[in-house]
Amino acid sequence: MEKDYTYGVARIRALEGKLFSDDDMTALLQCSDYSQCIAFLKSKGWGNGADSLEKMISIEKKNTSKLIKELSDDSNEMDILMIGDEYHNLKAAIKQVCTELETENVFYEDTKTDTEFLKNCIRQGNYNLLPKGMEQAAKDATTVLMQTGDGQLCDVIIDRATLEAIKQAGQEATNEMIKKYADDLVTISDIKIAVRCAATNKDASFVSKALVSCDGVSVTELIIACKDGLDGVCSYLEKIGYSQAVSALKISKSVFECWCDNKIVEDIKSQKYDSFSIGPIIAYVIARENEIKTVKIILSGKINGFDNEFIKERVRVMYA
């Protein structure tokens, strides 16, 4: 029997009213410049009065992390939300140790695993001390980077391990929404990987190292499709019902990336009507991450002087 999350969901329902809607994002996009965007965000209670996008995003991400910790319990089902950050930090730690370059602001905060601990494990070769699931990937990625200097292959190893961890978390979850979210995330990631590999003419060996099996697509068929380039991948996607992804890709890669994020958000919207499971809590956090990402896209576009039409095609669909 699934735990009763009535209290946590009640808190989420109160917070959902503060999420940006599609209209809010349109209003932000219509701001004349960066300063007006910051003023708009302040008016919406964003960033605790901070005066820069970087500080605002940092504060909003910390607020979300704090909420996750407050609503987490001993079931660990909310850990799926932090897997991406955990493995990002592992990748950054490996690169810092191997290159001996201490780049600032590359680590996500509020993760379970301390970044100095990660770096010490890698320096000393104590991979067995790393969290379960990270050990072999960390060893393989470090070996590749040290012996060949191939940063791309290092990334592939860690990115695949990330997807494997998400898949595992979904399989172990008791909540059906988490199971579906995990498989959807792996599916969309596989599609994105296949598109990138096809566009850059990666061979079958490389593609197979990057993809992770899931219910949404056939890894075997995707690998075969990649041999025929983007046309092959598009034909396969249309065959299995992802014609919208193909249509987006034919417009531009940025529109395709937007479709990928929108697909995840659209699939979690049903959680608005569930008041008794962890689903709405997970969905809210995903919605917040989507909101923060979209705000960053819009303001980055403003800073770089892009016109509104260029920015608009990159704006994600909101959960609210």
Image (spheres, rainbow, N blue to C red):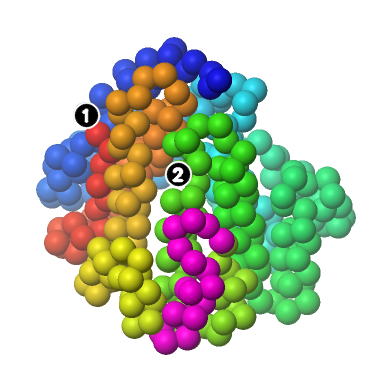
The answer to if 214 sits in the magenta stretch is yes
Q: Which of the two residues, 266 or 159, is positioned nearer the viewer here? A: 266
Q: Amino acid at mark 1?
A: Ser
Rendered image quadrant of residue 271: top left
Above or below, 46 relative to 89: above
Residue 180 visible in the snapshot: yes
Which quadrant is home to the N terminus?
Answer: top right
Q: Is residue 105 left or right of residue 259?
A: right
* Range of residues picked out in magenta: 213-229
Which quadrant is home to the C terminus?
Answer: top left
* Residue 258, percent from left and from top: 30, 58
Rendered image quadrant of residue 239: bottom left
At x 52% / y 83%, what residue is drawn?
202
Asked which secondary structure carries label 1, the reply is helix
Asked which secondary structure carries label 2, the reply is helix
At x 33% / y 44%, what residue is drawn?
267
Q: Amino acid at mark 2?
A: Tyr
Above or below, 271 relative to 121: above
* Residue 318, percent from left and from top: 26, 42
Label count reads 2
At x 14% / y 61%, what residue is drawn?
309
Q: Which residue is mark 2?
A: 181
Q: Which of the two residues, 281 or 175, is positioned nearer the viewer here? A: 175
Count residues near mark 1 (Cα–Cα under 10 Å), then give few for <14, some for 14-19, many for 20+.
few
Residue 66 visible in the snapshot: no
Count residues near mark 2 (Cα–Cα under 10 Å), then give few for <14, some for 14-19, many for 20+.
many
In front: label 1 or label 2: 2
Above or below, 17 relative to 136: above
The answer to if 304 sits in the magenta stretch is no
Q: Which residue is mark 1?
A: 43
Labelled pair 1, 2 in contact (Cβ < 8 Å): no
* Residue 116, percent from left and from top: 74, 45
